């Protein structure tokens, strides 16, 4: 297809409850949506997972807008005819900016699949129609508030709990949550780089709570530290922030720094690279699961298709839309039933936009003619 237009649309969505991680507290989400229009008039959407500030990774919303309008759009325009599978190669000269690249590829993929009348799930070839749903629980100001939130998610039927941790909010909350949910339910922790190589003894205490994994305890760059930690504790070490490409995944696996990988398509430059990393992990016996970035129904639909692949053996952060948003921008938001979410099957990424609501929460729109 040939694209005639790229739309950069910023929206503002309030969170139903504040979400605190070791890198900050969010009460709302500024999200950049990328709309592409093909020459036959088909529209596809991509959702960029960059945050407003560069606190999770170097990318941020305003920066992504600049990169797309100044560097990505001109290259796509110059290329002319393309398919989603060409995007990574076309954009290779641009260093980094995985989230910007992923969002464009996602929009083209959506348009392409809509034209073909097939769904992303079918394109990826995952065998499952439903996938287990995990929920990510932020840092609270009190243990009581944490335990009551966790109990609510258990009542909602989630298949596993992920607790955000940081120094000062780790061993005791984990102990009490394990006590609350019992020995059977899946429990894991996510530090978002909050610890250092001096914390191994401290983190070893988590071994007592039968965790599925500890996610990204050390700095993004600290592969050797993660390797050493993996050797020092029993809890499996999972990488998130450290893996931004197939090659980084290969390296981390090769040196023993990644016993498990959280695959986030936005972080690795797109869904197609995410599938390649999945295949690499399967070939190396590394379990994977699909992470979340507080996506709307667009990103959640696509994440479901990815997580339906066989190598995704652990529940992902694909919770119900209403865990974060009182109203979604899609008409058929993801819901959790008996701990599972249904993988969408409609053409494209598998959602229908709630256009009126989308309009009402739009804060800016920029059209790039190609
Ligand atoms: O369920 O969408 C979700 C959120 C899961 O905790 C979650 N995401 O570090 O994995 C993370 C974290 C995150 C959210 C990171 C937003 C960056 C931005």
Image: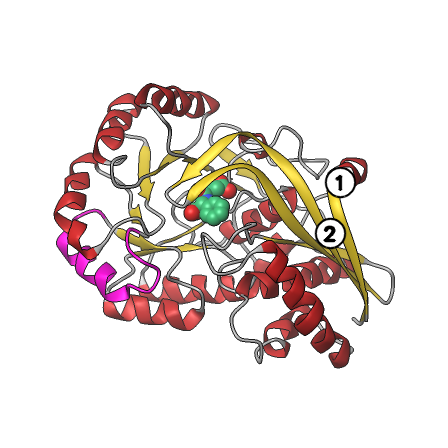
Which quadrant does the C terminus fall into? bottom right
| Residue topped by disc 1 | 358
Q: Is residue 53 magenta?
A: no
Q: Which residue is mark 2?
A: 9
* 230 drawn magenta: yes
Q: Are marks 2 and 1 in contact (CB under 8 Å)?
A: yes
Residue 32 in percent (x, y) is at 66, 52
**What's drawn in magenta, residue-wise?**
217-235
Q: Is residue 292 visible?
A: no
Residue depicted at 59% across the width and 41% down the height: 29
Q: Nearer the viewer, residue 241 or 130?
A: 241
Kindly identify the residue that appears in the image at 50 percent across and 62 percent down: 274
| Residue 133 placement, left or right of 195 | right
> Residue 186: percent from the left, percent from the top?
32, 35
Give the distance between the C-alpha atoms of the residues marked 2 and 1, in whole angstroms.
10 Å
**Rendered position, 42 above or below 185:** below
Which label lies toward us, 2 or 1? 2
Q: Quadrant of the N terminus?
A: bottom right
Q: Position of residue 365 (x, y in %)?
A: 78, 52
- The kind of secondary structure element at disc 2 is strand
Residue shown at the point (32%, 71%) measured from the top left: 251
First along the sequence among labels 2 and 1: 2
């Amino acid at each position: 297809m040939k694209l005639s237009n790229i739309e950069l649309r910023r929206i503002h969505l309030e969170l139903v409850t504040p979400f605190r991680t070791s890198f900050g507290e969010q009460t709302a989400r500024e999200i950049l949506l990328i709309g592409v229009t093909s020459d036959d008039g088909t529209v596809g959407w991509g959702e960029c997972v960059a945050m407003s500030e560069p606190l999770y990774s170097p990318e941020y919303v305003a920066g992504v807008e600049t990169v797309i309008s100044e560097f990505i759009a001109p290259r796509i325009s110059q290329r002319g005819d393309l398919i989603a599978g060409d995007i990574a190669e076309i954009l290779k000269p641009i260093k980094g900016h995985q989230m910007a690249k992923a969002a464009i590829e996602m929009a083209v993929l959506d348009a392409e699949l809509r034209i073909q009348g097939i769904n992303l799930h079918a394109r990826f070839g995952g065998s499952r129609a439903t996938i287990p749903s995990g929920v990510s629980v932020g840092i609270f100001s009190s243990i009581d508030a944490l335990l009551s939130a966790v109990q609510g998610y258990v009542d909602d039927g989630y298949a596993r709990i992920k607790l955000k941790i940081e120094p000062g909010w780790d061993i005791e909350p984990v102990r009490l949550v394990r006590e609350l949910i019992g020995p059977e339910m899946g429990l894991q922790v996510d530090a978002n780089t909050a610890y250092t190589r001096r914390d191994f003894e401290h983190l070893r205490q988590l071994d007592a709570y039968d965790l599925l994994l500890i996610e990204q305890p050390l700095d993004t760059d600290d592969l050797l530290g993660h390797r050493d930690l993996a050797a020092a504790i029993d809890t499996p070490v999972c990488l998130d922030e450290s893996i931004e490409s197939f090659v980084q995944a290969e390296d981390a696996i090769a040196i023993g720094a990644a016993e498990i990988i959280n695959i986030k398509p936005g972080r690795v430059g797109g869904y197609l690279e995410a599938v390649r990393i999945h295949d690499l992990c399967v070939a190396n016996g590394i379990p994977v699961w699909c992470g979340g970035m507080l996506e709307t129904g667009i990103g959640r639909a696509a994440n479901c298709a990815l997580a339906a692949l066989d190598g995704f053996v652990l529940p992902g952060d694909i919770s119900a839309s209403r865990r974060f948003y009182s109203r979604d921008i899609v008409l058929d938001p993801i819901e959790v039933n008996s701990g599972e979410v249904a993988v969408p099957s409609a053409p494209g990424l598998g959602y229908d936009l709630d256009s009126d609501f989308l309009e009402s929460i739009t804060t800016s729109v920029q059209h790039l003619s190609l």
